[in-house]
Image: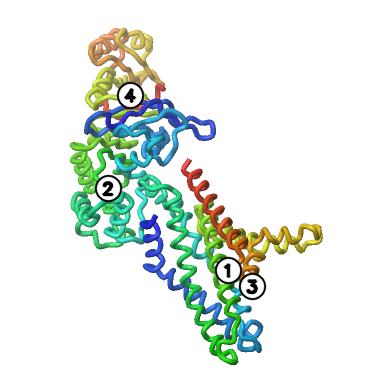
Amino acid sequence: MIIDVKSLSKQYSGKTVVDELSFSSDRPEIIGLLGPNGAGKSTTMKMLTGYVRPSSGTATINGYDITSHPMEVKQSVGYLPESNPLYYNMYVREFLCFIASLYALSDVETKVEEAIVKVGLNSEAHKKIGNLSKGYKQRTGLAQVLLHDPSVLILDEATSGLDANQLHEIRELIKHLGKTKTILFSSHIMQEVEALCDRVIIIHQGRIIRDGSISVLKRIESQLRNLSLELLEPSKNIEAYKNLKAALAFDTDDFKNINISFKDSHDIRPEIFNTAVKNGDIVIKMELADQSIESVFQKLTKNT
Amino acid sequence: MIQIFRKEFNAFFNSLTGYAVITFFLVVTGMFMWIFRDTGIIYTPFASLDPFFEFVPVVLLFLVPAITMKSFSEEFQNGTIELLATKPIHSYQIILGKFIANALLVIMAIVPTLLYYFTIYQLSDPPGNVDHGAIIGSYIGLVLLAVTFTSIGIFASSLSDHQISGFLLSVLFIFIMHWGFYYASSTPFVPISIEITLQKWGMQYHYEQISKGFLDTKSSIYFITVAWLFLQMTVWVVQYRQK
């Protein structure tokens, strides 16, 4: 098992931030840790990298326990913290050589040059970190993660704040790395995870509420669909819509604009049309909401 | 540890900090030594460095916190502590590396003042008629004092994310540790019986003991213990702040 998290929990002054988290991975893959801000993603990552001590539970990385063998864990993990902290007064190469020396690597200079090439920093490697653009700072952060060629990468919001071009390049890089390494990638943005990850773990209030491949999640999404209906006049017999067998959820404020959720396996539109005809309501719009994985996420996190 | 030391030490001399510290120290002590009438040795009939060793702790009271104030507060403020703490090194290695780099800079500022010793040596009549033992003892005392001040400064810096708070706390702690016990012992509330005992808690007493010229083992152990204690407390603070 490369990553094996068992009932990992963290409490801060009585408040549970991470609650009995368990998941594992035994192969190179990109796992998206998805959740709203404050869901416990960063705390989980901080625990896995040995920065924060868990309140209870534990995890192993490459067979090493994070609490009893933190040094071995740190040796086999590459961690990019959320804010991408760097020493702005150091030069890129100087900084990377410093980080490499902390891993007691042999042939530091070759490894630094390799990392620079891997993340595409060549043109900026002679500069002071403080003078780099945000995208290049992010690359410097990624380079320091790759120096010791770890088998596990933990990247906390690694793509936040990048422009479209930078985003594309960094994503490609992470995807490429994901072929040989197990990557834990956190984000609060759906599209990020959708674009990058093979597997998604949705965290809400410190608990895992879904763990599966992107396609499985999309299936959950497709099980429920939303339909928005607009009538010319407020319906006099709103109950008729509500009582439709296939309608799972029903919501209206003014009896004119109606939202209905139904199972995708059964198209509800003909029934709605017939009900409207029976009621004498004039339908001016009937639209199936184009559900993104975002809405699944919202649904999942709202219901818990 | 050596990597952290190297990084910290290089940072002093890659910026103006290192040069500014040494210049400041030499200019201030030089003025006290040779220019100001109250403390200048050329206005006294004695070939002695005593005035230098008396005022130098006051200079260090402000100089050492200025050097150490950013050592941890900056790491916490920029989040780079997370970078260091997730690398395969122990927190005590980080702290020791920083401590040695900072202490070495302070010692580097002190070393050129050996020139004052040489000057006194030449000025005395006949040349060389100075109390060598007292001067050597005083220098050892001064180095021990500077190193202990540095450990207090490093500790104060770990308490806050802000350099200014680190500086002020550091000045306060150094003042208490060096002068505080002496002043406290001379207040009317303190019974005479414990006056000396209270003074022995402070650094000033031990600094003076060593300055007398015989290397006082007890006082040396005192300095080493205080320095170690503050470094140990820094380890606790740094670990606690990671939660």
The mark lying in front, picked from 1 and 2, is 1
Q: Amino acid at mark 2?
A: Leu
Residue A41's spot in the image, x, y percent? 38, 35
Q: Amino acid at mark 4?
A: Arg
The quadrant of the rendering that contains the N terminus of chain B is bottom left
CA separation in Å, label 1 and label 3: 10 Å
The mark lying in front, picked from 3 and 4, is 3
Label 1, secondary structure: give it.
helix
Q: Which residue is mark 4?
A: A210
Whether B120 is drawn above or below A265: the answer is below
Left or right placement of residue B115 versus residue B48 in this view = left
Label 2, secondary structure: give it.
helix
Q: Residue at x 18, y 36 (%)?
A: A179
For the residues labelled 2 and 4, say whether their Cβ atoms are less than 8 Å apart.
no
Q: Residue B46: name its quadrant.
A: bottom right
For the residues labelled 3 and 2, say whether their Cβ atoms are less than 8 Å apart.
no
For the residues labelled 1 and 3, say whether their Cβ atoms are less than 8 Å apart.
no
